[in-house]
Image (cartoon, rainbow, N blue to C red):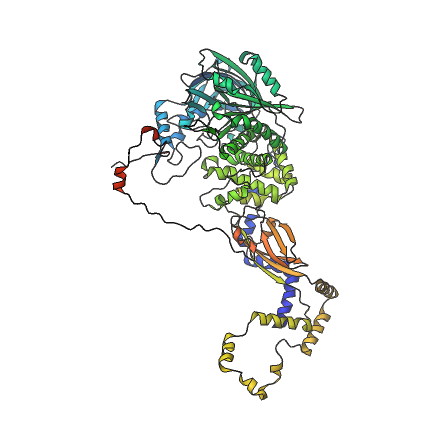
Amino acid sequence: MRNSTLFFMVGIVLGAGLSGLAQAAAKGVPGDADKRFAQLEQMLPTPTEVRNASGAPGARYWQQRADYRIKVALDEQKHRISGSQTITYTNRSPDALTYLWLQLDQNVFKDSSISRRTEITTSTGARSMSTTAGDIVSYGTLRREQAFEDTKFGFEMGAVTGPGGKPLKVTVNDTMARVDLETPLKPGQSIVLSMSWAFNIINEAAIGGRSGYEYFPDNNTYLYFIAQWFPRLAAYTDYTGWQHKQFLGRGEFTLEFGDFDVEITVPADHVVSATGVLQNAAAVLTAEQRARLKRAETAKEPVFVVTPAEAAANEKGHATGTRTWQFKAQNVRDFGWASSRKFIWDAMGHHQDDARMPLVMAMSFYPNEAEPVWSHYSTQAVAHTLASYSRLSFPFPYPTAQSVNTWERGGMEYPMISFNGYRPSKDEKSGKVTYSSDVKYGLIGVVIHEVGHNYFPMIVNSDERQWTWMDEGLNTFLEYTAELAWEDKFPAFANKTNVLDFITDYMKSSNQVPIMTNSESVVQFGPNGYTKPTAALSVLRETVMGRELFDHAFREYANRWKFKRPTPADFFRTMEDASGVDLDWFWRGWFYGTDHVDVGVSSVREYQISSQDPEREFPLARSKFQADYPRALQEQNARAAEGAPLLERAPVLRDLYNENDEFTVTNKDRNEYKEFREKLKPWEREALDRALKASQYFYFVDFRNVGGLVTPLPLTLQFADGTVEELLIPAEIWRYDAEQVTKLFIRPKRIVSVQLDAKHQIADADVSNNQYPPRIAQSRLEVFKGKSKDKNLMLDLMTELKSAKDEPKDAGAQAPLQPVN
Ligand SMILES: [Zn+2]
């Protein structure tokens, strides 16, 4: 028995790899290890000559082109815009097209829209779904429904005409319209469509959307931010044909690249910010404003083009005449603009090492209500975004990047222009203006995010209506890298700097869908589309691939697909193709699954190699036996109660068994040892003796995968001499068994503790099982004081009535709702 135990130990040490393999084959594959590491080929679309197997645009890559000339006028009295436009559409596809589709996003606000008719209580009035318990109605919902009652929204379309001014048949289907062509548009041909249209602008604060107007009751002024505002030619692609999924509110859009020439007619005292470059500065700006704009090109800090004082004076007036601002933009997929007499305007040149676009004008437009925080941070954040994003992608290819303050919170992106929230607050009594840390970092973060969207998806033109994560996820990841480059301990995720500490609650939750879910079906929109992809890419960059491989591959993806149209497969394939890292397990786990990361160290066993020499080993075995089996309590109590045992009183009973135990070395043992040594092959004997001489420690460490998502194992070994060793075990350790694995560590010194993920780099949702031996959890306990609240009618009746000016502001956002009997 004892000999076989000793032999067994050597057997384990030398044959661990083989026996592990044999076990897996016999039992099947625990934890679906085969499925977790299965290649993605069966799930990804078959590579084509348009998009190839390496994830790059193929030899026959094509995309359509749409160029626009638009004239639009803003009617400030009626909150209405009307316009006319031509679209020059060029068919570069290999297909003849008998009809074209237009995208009419304003129709989402029609009472008859699919979006309006399918609103549910949890989504009403909210761009992101909020959860509510029970039947409640908010003041916001009341105001929203009243706004829909008061005004009809949606496009009012005039005729659409084709070549020779001939009217074409138009069939409107919710937020899409099909234009039937008289003759098919052949590959290589272009067609010019003309059309006119008008719509009432929504009060964004009441209705909620990506654009609209905002009313400032304190000084009776308005601010207009206009987007998704003209009939836009829908995308026609190799992967889905016409992208005419209806606009339901979430899935944003994808469009064709083209050049824009837009004339915007607004009240004469308005200042306009828009996609592209202002063409007629002499007609709309004073000589001084133009000089300031010129000076801003080389300024180290933002320069006011319109000062706060000028804007304050401006908003007191009410011009009766109009002025037309003309903008041109090249190679953009959309066009947005904003207009108000409230605008302060500042600008600063961003210089980049790029011969094609050495100077980009970073600019901000905001009302005095946004001060002083906007002039301090907005334009600086715009410039910082360009510098930071370009490091992981490409130089900014457009001449301007603008940030417009349009609402209290949130943001929305369009090419070269973005609408951003966050304003300071004004104390009503003292008039003091202050801003919280949330407002400051919220503003910096949202400007980085929305300006950053220029890269993804405005330039790397992924399909937002299909996949939210491809732009929001990649962009939030880059936003995060820019925030980390802004200052240390940036509170990027609700006061946490590490996204991996933030994401674990979401990843543990049961109410979730994979990242690879169509935009409109995503639940927990923010964590799913924004934060989890950011966490995934962080793990990929810092832990799985390392920065060198990741950054090269990510840059390759950005450059392959800038001004082109990537799909998820193109991203997955490029990241592997450019890095040589098999990431199928990673995409499966993080993008196609809903498991979370939770790994633990369940056991550590320490060994030293046995020499098998009885003279050396038996005394050690005896000590271990004695330590393992303490003297029987029954025997101890018997001795205490009854005194010495019989054997001591009658020595005649003694024999050799009383002098020896099973650990006594006999000649038989010595012979067996000799025989054992002789039977070893020379190399076996050499290996054993070398190991004995080194007197190394052998550790069998059991890892458990509790969460299911396979992950690399960052490990910290603490030694008895106080030194520390850090190592990273790749995720492939789980490829035979994704539930439990044992790994052997041979070290010259004794290990006293093993710790997983000490730096929080894998999004481990439960760190309590990461330490072996376990630690006592330490925290502070607050003593709880129970409160009872009795209604004292006698006291309540004696309470004095408060005067009107003491009235509390707002009891909360919830309107009183009485059940109807
Ligand atoms: Zn976004």
Relative side of 187 to 670, left or right: left
713 in relation to 555, above or below: below
At a point 62% along the width and 80% down the height, the residue shown is: 660
Residue 631 in the image, given as x and y percentages of width and height: 54, 74
Relative side of 665 to 289, left or right: right
Mark yes or no: residue 279 visible.
no
308 in relation to 117, above or below: above
Marks counted in the figure total 0
Mark yes or no: residue 445 visible.
yes
For the residue pair 334 and 693, the one nearer the viewer reads as: 693
Rendered image quadrant of residue 80: top left
Q: Quadrant of the C terminus?
A: top left
For the residue pair 505 and 565, the one nearer the viewer reads as: 505
511 in relation to 260, above or below: below
Q: Quadrant of the N terminus?
A: bottom right
For the residue pair 697 and 690, the one nearer the viewer reads as: 697
Residue 586 in the image, given as x and y percentages of width and height: 57, 44
For the residue pair 628 and 64, the one nearer the viewer reads as: 628
Residue 531 in the image, given as x and y percentages of width and height: 52, 39
634 in relation to 195, above or below: below
Residue 688 in the image, given as x and y percentages of width and height: 71, 65
